Image (cartoon, grey):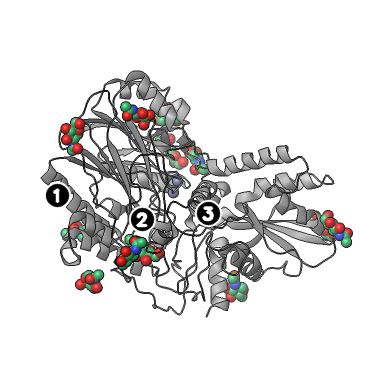
Amino acid sequence: MQRASAILSALAAAAAVLACPGEEHDHVHAYQKREYPQVPLTPPSRPLVWSDVNVIHTTDSHGWLLGHQHLSFPEPNYSGDFGDFASFVTHMKAIAEEKDVDLLLIDTGDLHDGTGLSDGFPPGQVDGHETNKFIMDLPYDVLAIGNHELYDYANTYDMYTNFAPYWNGRYLSSNVNITVYTGNGNETMSVPVGERYVKFKTGKGRSVTSLGILYDFTGNDVNTTVQTVAKMVKEDWFTEAIKEEPDFFLLLGHMPVRYDNWPTVYDAIRKVHKYTPILIFGGHTHIRDCTQFDGRSIALESGRYMETVGWLSANLSGSDTENITFTRRYLDANRVTYEYHTNTSNSTYDTTAGRNITTGLQQLWDTYDLSYLYGTAPQDYTLSRNPYPSNGSVLSLLVTEALPYALMINNTRVNIPNIILVNSGELRYDVFAGDSPLPFADAFLYIPNITLAVAEQVLPGLNDDGDDDRRRSLERAAEREAERYARGDVSVRFNAWLEEMSTRRVRSRADDDNLTLGYVTSDQCPGVGDDTPHIAVPYYSSPDYISSDAPSVSNDTLIDLVFINFIEADVLEILNDVQSDTTYTESDVLSYSPLLASAVLGLYAQEYWN
Ligand SMILES: *[C@@H]1O[C@H](CO)[C@@H](O)[C@H](O)[C@H]1NC(C)=O
Ligand SMILES: *[C@@H]1O[C@H](CO)[C@@H](O)[C@H](O)[C@H]1NC(C)=O
Ligand SMILES: *[C@@H]1O[C@H](CO)[C@@H](O)[C@H](O)[C@H]1NC(C)=O
Ligand SMILES: *[C@@H]1O[C@H](CO)[C@@H](O)[C@H](O)[C@H]1NC(C)=O
Ligand SMILES: *[C@@H]1O[C@H](CO)[C@@H](O)[C@H](O)[C@H]1NC(C)=O
Ligand SMILES: *[C@@H]1O[C@H](CO)[C@@H](O)[C@H](O)[C@H]1NC(C)=O
Ligand SMILES: *[C@@H]1O[C@H](CO)[C@@H](O)[C@H](O)[C@H]1NC(C)=O
Ligand SMILES: *[C@@H]1O[C@H](CO)[C@@H](O)[C@H](O)[C@H]1NC(C)=O
Ligand SMILES: *[C@@H]1O[C@H](CO)[C@@H](O)[C@H](O)[C@H]1NC(C)=O
Ligand SMILES: *[C@@H]1O[C@H](CO)[C@@H](O)[C@H](O)[C@H]1NC(C)=O
Ligand SMILES: *[C@@H]1O[C@H](CO)[C@@H](O)[C@H](O)[C@H]1NC(C)=O
Ligand SMILES: *[C@@H]1O[C@H](CO)[C@@H](O)[C@H](O)[C@H]1NC(C)=O
Ligand SMILES: [Zn+2]
Ligand SMILES: [Zn+2]
């Protein structure tokens, strides 16, 4: 499945480290993992509000278990590692015990594809298999599957055989199946990866019915099945699962809390239980968000990459019909935050189990040899904090420098002029000064013999600024976006969030002076959201598709139209739009280079940053 692996690697681009398993290099072990915050961190603004049911939420951790270790801001805000987080959970559980209240720990999927720790595995192993063991070290009450668990059958199978069984029915995949061999014969069967739902009692004896739902994802591998949410709520098992009234519904899902299908699930439950509290925890678009469908429900999404830890409290001991008092908070994942909320200090914070996890992660780091440096970036290159095109844009770096250099290495088509096209969602993280470049592992394809005049019209067509029929082209651009979203590309939603934050001015300049860079969330729930106040990071939008500069040749020169495999269908569509001499199909598309996109920045860094 070329398509599937394309998205997989598109999102794997987030990695700040690039593993090179099995390769021989002169390794430079210059990069040390920094365990403790290297810069002073601002503590949170106020204590958490505890109530009788409390939840800690992680989502879309994508392998970022060693914390964000870059010194460029706002990265130190997220420097807590998974061992630190484990200690946090232990202290919080003790506080909950003392307060005699419930505290649940939950996760809503996408456990890998993002860092070398999860993805830098040697050949023969499975993505995320080792990092999953650290997830298993934490006392999660319920977990839900993410789309990244489905791009590659081997991953899903690993979740099915090794991860799900560990949780004794608490790993949920309500609408996700895997096809496996069963019994003695060679018969196959489609079965849920985890459980469809679970009913359990909390420590304080509250009854809970929980589901784990994936959004309508279409980029899944062969022999995995994703049922649409609309179909799922019509299943007999679903009706049966929600029939009995629990003290509250705990709905987990790898699905954003707004602009997706939560209302479908919420409505189905509300039809049967008018007032039962519904606590929804979403994910997938990597943003901080919260909304309420009514006064007795709440839906929280808690960011990404272990930058954010979500907190929710609900007072369920009030009246059975009046609005419930909820609070939610988005914690910056660092030791200062954790210590503040657990009344601990640097010296009393660590637990033995937490330290052990940190040590285990560091060992995995060494085993995968993640300290290897391809080169040292002379400056920060950012995805959206600098305009595109500009010297500080990683998108510019990619299309004007790195791709034209790397794709020409050992390429027989080196003398034929080209235009190289990629979708900007392909890149998922900044490149920081002093750090190694980021990986992303797609293949490059091309169509030969396209005149420059035609090739030059493809990019504007993709970005929808070429067409006379503006409405039609807007519609088609929206269709293309919806299709990229269904296959797992969340860049449009995530960028819209960044943009909204940076354009909003909620504080006066004077107040801003003391604040540090970070997320400034405005969601639809009452009260304070961000645990630590920040000013928004500057945001510059970039087009959905970007390309290298056109070669200086005449309009009728035949050139190679080169593009990343993720956008093959889009390129063919536009190419057939802008000319009518030839109807291009997949059979006209050839492999441009054996080089995978993951190698591009590494090769560039080796050549130019050493
Ligand atoms: C929950 O609400 C009830 C009724 O309003 C109140 O008596 C109680 O103190 C609240 N509990 C917490 C933990 O806030
Ligand atoms: C967040 O990053 C800023 C830099 O923008 C830094 O000065 C600040 O101390 C950090 N705050 C926290 C809570 O980590
Ligand atoms: C199962 O398949 C294998 C190889 O495909 C074959 O050798 C074996 O005889 C089959 N077993 C049964 C019970 O059909
Ligand atoms: C999922 O697996 C169950 C159990 O085998 C089966 O009944 C159901 O039809 C499957 N659902 C889908 C959508 O494949
Ligand atoms: C999917 O599973 C079927 C058995 O149900 C098997 O024959 C087929 O080879 C599998 N396809 C892939 C691509 O693994
Ligand atoms: C209850 O909550 C809903 C949804 O948040 C809100 O529209 C409504 O005004 C609230 N009612 C009261 C009495 O506070
Ligand atoms: C916390 O303790 C560690 C280990 O003793 C030390 O290296 C670090 O500098 C301390 N950090 C702070 C902020 O005191
Ligand atoms: C420490 O971690 C290892 C795995 O990394 C695990 O096998 C062991 O049980 C852990 N020990 C403690 C005391 O948590
Ligand atoms: C290019 O070819 C040379 C000689 O065969 C080889 O050593 C080198 O690894 C190749 N480079 C890439 C990027 O494939
Ligand atoms: C491209 O054009 C050249 C000459 O114009 C021709 O030799 C070649 O076969 C063409 N390639 C394809 C794939 O059409
Ligand atoms: C080349 O093609 C472009 C786009 O079709 C057109 O705007 C331009 O005038 C052409 N230039 C020449 C010299 O024909
Ligand atoms: C900024 O911080 C300084 C030192 O902590 C403090 O004295 C001052 O009042 C703060 N200013 C604002 C506007 O919060
Ligand atoms: Zn994700
Ligand atoms: Zn996702």
Q: Quadrant of ligand 4?
A: top left
Q: Report, in whole angstroms, how far the alpha carbon at label 1 lies from the one at label 2.
A: 27 Å
Q: Nearer the viewer, mark 2 or mark 3?
A: 2
Nearer the N terminus, badge 2 or badge 3? Answer: 3
Do the CB atoms of the residues marked 1 and 3 lie less than 8 Å apart? no
Q: What is the C-alpha distance between the residues marked 2 and 3?
A: 31 Å
Q: Residue at x 31, y 21 (%)?
A: 273
> Which residue is disc 2 drawn over?
533
Residue 6 location (% of width, % of height): 55, 51
x, y percentage for residue 522? 42, 46
- Number of other residues with Cα within 10 Å of mark 2, as a class: few under 14, some 14 to 19, many 20 or more: many
Residue 390 pos. (x, y %): 61, 67
| x 57%, y 72%: residue | 604
Residue designated by label 1:
94
Type of the residue with mark 3: Ala
| Residue matched to label 3 | 10
Upstream in the sequence, badge 1 or badge 3? 3
Q: Quadrant of residue 443?
A: bottom right
Dot 3 lies on which element? helix
The quarter holding residue 335 reads: bottom left
Q: Is residue 231 left or right of residue 350?
A: right
Quadrant of the rendered structure where residue 365 is?
Answer: bottom left
Residue 388 is left or right of residue 216, and the answer is: right
Q: Are marks 1 and 2 in contact (CB under 8 Å)?
A: no
**Left or right: where 52 falls relative to 602:** left
Front residue of 315 and 592: 315
Report the amino acid beneath label 2. Pro
**Nearer the viewer's eye, disc 1 or disc 3?**
1
Q: CA distance from mark 1 to mark 3?
A: 40 Å
Question: Badge 3: how crowded within 10 Å, few (<14), some, or many (20+)?
Answer: many
**For mark 1, does the 10 Å Cα neighbourhood hold few (<14), some (14 to 19), or many (20 or more) residues?**
some
